[in-house]
């Protein structure tokens, strides 16, 4: 009976640890989504700035275009990283869920 209680406590501890890992990964993913939104907003702001710019100086136009290109590249990089992180988090979550399910199956056997 004591052994069963210890095993139950161990499974409960492991389950709580896995839940915390899921929470941590979800929190990190949320942060990446916030960064992505900020980058999208920056691209939109710079695009609007370029559209409203009436100064026909080629140096100013080149500067703004370069900034937009830089922000678009940053957005692309953030999106790619976010997708990679999302896939990694989904795999980790699936692995954690599989581990929980296996623990439950092992415990019930």
Image: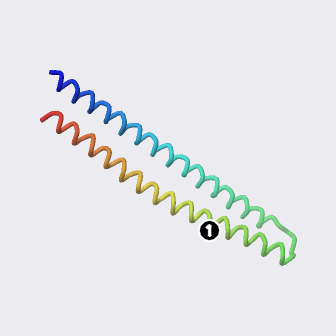
Examine the rendered structure and indicate whether residue 83 appears above or below residue 59.
above
Left or right of 30 in this view: 101: left
| Quarter in which the N terminus is drawn | top left
User: Splitting the image into 4 quarters, where does residue 58 fall?
Assistant: bottom right
The reply, left or right, for residue 90 in relation to residue 30 is: left
Residue 83 pos. (x, y %): 47, 59
Q: Quadrant of the C terminus?
A: top left
Q: Residues within 10 Å of mark 1 (few under 14, many from 20)?
A: some
Q: Nearer the viewer, residue 61 or 90?
A: 90
Along the line of sight, the residue nearer the viewer: 100 or 4: 4
From the top left corner, tell me how far across and down residue 12 is, in percent.
Answer: 29, 30
Q: Is residue 95 above or below residue 20?
A: below
Q: In the current view of this chain or complex, which residue is farthest to the bottom?
A: 58
Q: How is the image coloured?
A: rainbow
| Residue drawn at point x = 80 percent, y = 64 percent | 52
Q: Nearer the viewer, residue 59 or 53?
A: 59
Helix, strand or loop at label 1? It is helix
Residue 8 horizontal side relative to residue 84, left or right? left
Residue 20: where, in percent of width, then height? 41, 37
Q: Which residue is mark 1?
A: 73
């Amino acid at each position: 009976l004591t052994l069963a209680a210890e095993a139950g406590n161990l499974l409960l501890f492991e389950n709580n640890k896995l839940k915390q890992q899921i929470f941590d990964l979800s929190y990190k993913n949320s942060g990446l989504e916030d960064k992505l939104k900020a980058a999208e907003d920056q691209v939109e702001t710079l695009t609007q700035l370029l559209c409203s710019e009436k100064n026909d100086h080629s140096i100013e136009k080149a500067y703004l275009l370069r900034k937009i290109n830089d922000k678009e590249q940053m957005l692309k990089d953030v999106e790619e990283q976010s997708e990679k992180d999302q896939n990694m988090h989904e795999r980790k979550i699936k692995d954690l869920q599989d581990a929980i399910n296996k623990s439950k199956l092992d415990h019930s056997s």
